[in-house]
Image (cartoon, coloured by chain):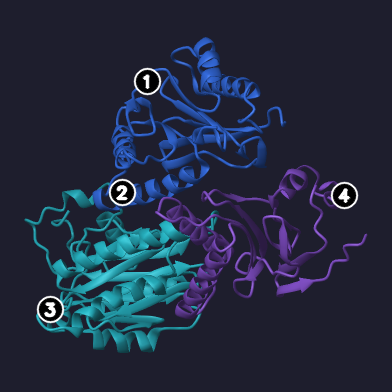
């Protein structure tokens, strides 16, 4: 049993045309036993950046709190909001601080840059090695299934609604084949004008 | 081999925990209280490594009491749960960690809502309508009814049951012979 | 203490549905670079009024350098509380944290106390809207309306006369403006002399919303209350 699979859960993020989407499942488990079906793994960082984490649930919560503290201090001292690229490096260095006793999570960052509205997604491993992907990034217990479905469903320059459909289908079909993820999903889409969040019921078993 | 359950109703939280104090195959005691009142509107059921449980529960109890004395008001259930989780999560990555699983139920007087938090020794926390720890959780979470008694491999002879609502904390008697 | 009695006045009024802060700026002049105050950040020009956290704004009177260090300490303390309890720090606790620090410097020789008085305007779910004052010795107290800095005696007695129980934010703003215009040394009011902030509850989310006014917004407010300078063409 790997500690990365102890609680279960998966996250995926995708780039569209001037928009990004990030989604997670809602399950919290103790190995095969489901404890809760309302455990979100994606958190807002600013109005235009979201952070998703899959792995050990305790560390998901700890890092959610840590990043909130770090970003709040950044915002109040710099008197401006953090940029997605900058935040990705903040995540990376925070994880690398624990190089020899890591947090057991893999994060995914999705956001829009301030001026250009350029979509940004990235993921890192448990010690903060950044992967700047251009299409989609995945993590969690359904990683291998997510790669497969995303690879065939995703295409460049999707409009927000089409991107929503693509990421929803990708995640729902991937977690259906994963015993440790599922129990509904939550999808966030960020566009220059607005961000919206939708909860979807999937196979609830 | 411990069991604890909790569930929220419209305006209350009810928590039950077994009363066994056992070591290996020997049962030492059958009237142990494993639910602490951490203030006027907060209950905590704890289970796990013997020794750790009581030590940690008292640590929590006294710290929350200190906070209440300093600030002239008790922490809300959400804030208390966050503090307890933080303590467990910090302890997990220390040299000697507490192996304690917790159900924290309280009545939020500011919002007039019952709150229940499930926490394990890793510092996992979840805001849930009903929860359980121990072997009972495998039954309770899927059934959540009186079948628990019938189906449980180790059938405990008695449970201590406490309720928290707007009136505060109180203990209730449950007839286990049914 | 001497520095504080010469410092720009800071005024606070507690209303039923919010708190109002106003401060007189001392460092002014045509050559002062205020370009960063026009956009970005949290508003204000960063001399007298600071955002400490979501639910607390503070006005400072005294040594500005000391104030900066205290503001930084307070912001860290507020974030630490949020980190451990997942709730915004209660206003009185934040004031207490700063006062513990300030008191420490009155205990031992060799160190100089912080030459700063602060007015805290805040909201928390335990006691709703609150207004606190703390002095360099580490004393703090809660107020319905109070004042620190130069001419605080005059302002205090004015507030005493004019303050009404259950005052609303709109009236509190008018009251603050009126008292400010009477206590400030200069005869005319303008955004180059005044900082202004309110703390209210968002109607929809019921969460506290701190607003530190930008220079243009301060001028608009002065105009609304008929206190704007007569010949303000030159300053724009």
The image position of residue A40, as x and y in percent, is 56, 40
Marks 3/2: CA distance?
31 Å
The lab-note entry on whether marks 2 and 4 share a chain reads no
The lab-note entry on whether marks 3 and 1 share a chain reads no
User: Is residue A40 shown above or below A73?
Assistant: above
Whether residue C20 appears in this view of the structure is: yes
Classify the position of the N terminus of chain A by image quarter: top right
Residue toward you, A74 or A88: A88
* Other residues around mark 2 within 10 Å, as few (<14) / some (14–19) / many (≥20): some
Q: What kind of element bears circle 3?
A: loop
Q: Tell me the blue chain.
A: A
Mark closer to the observer (3, 2): 3
Whether residue C207 appears in this view of the structure is: no
- Give the chain letter at badge 2: A
Q: In the rendering, what colour is chain C? A: cyan
Residue C42 is left or right of residue C16, and the answer is left
- Give the chain letter at badge 4: B
Marks 4/3: CA distance?
72 Å
What residue is rendered at 59% in x and 21% in y? A174
Marks 2/4: CA distance?
57 Å
Mark 1 and mark 2 in contact? Answer it, CB < 8 Å: no
Mark 2 and mark 4 in contact? Answer it, CB < 8 Å: no
């Amino acid at each position: 049993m790997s500690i990365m699979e102890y609680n279960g859960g998966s996250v995926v993020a995708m780039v569209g045309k001037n928009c990004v989407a990030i989604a997670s499942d809602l399950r919290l488990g103790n190995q095969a036993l489901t404890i809760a079906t309302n455990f979100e793994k994606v958190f807002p960082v600013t109005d235009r950046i979201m952070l998703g984490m899959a792995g050990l649930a305790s560390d998901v919560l700890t890092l959610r709190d840590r990043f909130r503290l770090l970003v709040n201090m950044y915002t109040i001292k710099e008197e401006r909001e953090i940029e997605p690229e900058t935040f990705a490096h903040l995540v990376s260095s925070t994880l690398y601080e624990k190089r020899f006793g890591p947090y057991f999570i893999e994060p995914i960052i999705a956001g829009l840059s301030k001026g250009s509205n350029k979509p940004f997604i990235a993921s890192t491993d448990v010690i903060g090695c950044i992967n700047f992907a251009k299409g989609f990034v995945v993590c969690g217990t359904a990683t291998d299934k997510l790669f497969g479905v995303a690879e065939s469903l995703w295409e460049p320059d999707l409009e927000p609604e089409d991107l929503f459909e693509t990421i929803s289908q990708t995640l729902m079909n991937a977690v259906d084949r994963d015993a440790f993820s599922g129990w509904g999903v939550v999808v966030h889409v960020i566009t220059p004008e607005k961000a919206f969040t939708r909860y979807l019921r999937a196979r609830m078993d | 081999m411990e069991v604890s359950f909790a569930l929220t109703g419209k305006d209350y939280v009810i928590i039950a925990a077994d009363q066994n104090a056992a070591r290996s195959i020997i049962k030492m005691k059958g009237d142990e209280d494993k639910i602490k009142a951490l203030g006027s509107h907060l209950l905590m059921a704890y289970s796990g490594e013997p020794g750790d449980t009581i030590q940690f529960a008292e640590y929590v109890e006294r710290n929350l009491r200190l906070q209440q004395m300093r600030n002239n008001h008790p922490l809300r259930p959400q804030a208390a749960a966050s503090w307890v989780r933080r303590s467990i999560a910090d302890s997990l990555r220390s040299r000697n960690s507490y192996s304690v699983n917790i159900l924290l139920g309280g009545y939020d007087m500011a919002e007039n809502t019952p709150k229940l938090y499930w926490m394990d020794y890793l510092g996992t926390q979840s805001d849930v309508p009903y929860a359980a720890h121990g072997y009972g959780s495998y039954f309770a979470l899927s059934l959540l009814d009186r079948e628990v008694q019938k189906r449980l491999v180790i059938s405990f002879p008695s449970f201590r049951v406490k309720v928290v609502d707007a009136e505060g904390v109180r203990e209730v008697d449950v007839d286990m012979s049914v | 203490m001497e520095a504080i009695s010469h410092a720009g006045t800071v005024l606070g009024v507690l209303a039923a549905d919010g708190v109002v802060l106003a401060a007189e700026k001392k460092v002014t002049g045509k050559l002062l670079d205020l370009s960063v105050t026009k956009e970005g950040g949290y508003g204000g020009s960063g001399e007298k009024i600071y955002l400490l956290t979501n639910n607390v704004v503070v006005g400072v009177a005294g040594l500005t350098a000391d104030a900066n260090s205290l503001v930084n300490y307070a912001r860290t303390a507020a974030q630490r509380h949020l980190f451990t309890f997942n709730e915004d720090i209660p206003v009185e606790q934040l004031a207490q944290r700063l006062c513990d620090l300030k008191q420490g410097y009155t205990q031992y020789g060799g160190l100089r106390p912080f030459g700063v008085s602060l007015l805290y305007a805040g909201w928390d779910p335990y006691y709703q809207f609150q207004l606190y004052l703390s002095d360099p010795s580490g004393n703090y107290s809660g107020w319905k309306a109070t004042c620190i800095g130069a001419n605080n005696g005059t302002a205090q007695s004015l507030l005493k006369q004019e303050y009404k129980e259950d005052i609303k934010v709109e009236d509190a703003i008018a009251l603050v403006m009126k008292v400010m215009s009477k206590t400030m040394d200069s005869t005319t009011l303008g955004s180059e002399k005044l900082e202004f902030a309110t703390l209210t509850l968002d109607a929809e989310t019921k969460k506290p919303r701190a607003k530190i006014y930008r220079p243009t917004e301060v001028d608009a407010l002065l105009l609304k209350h008929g206190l704007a300078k007569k010949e303000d063409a030159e300053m724009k």
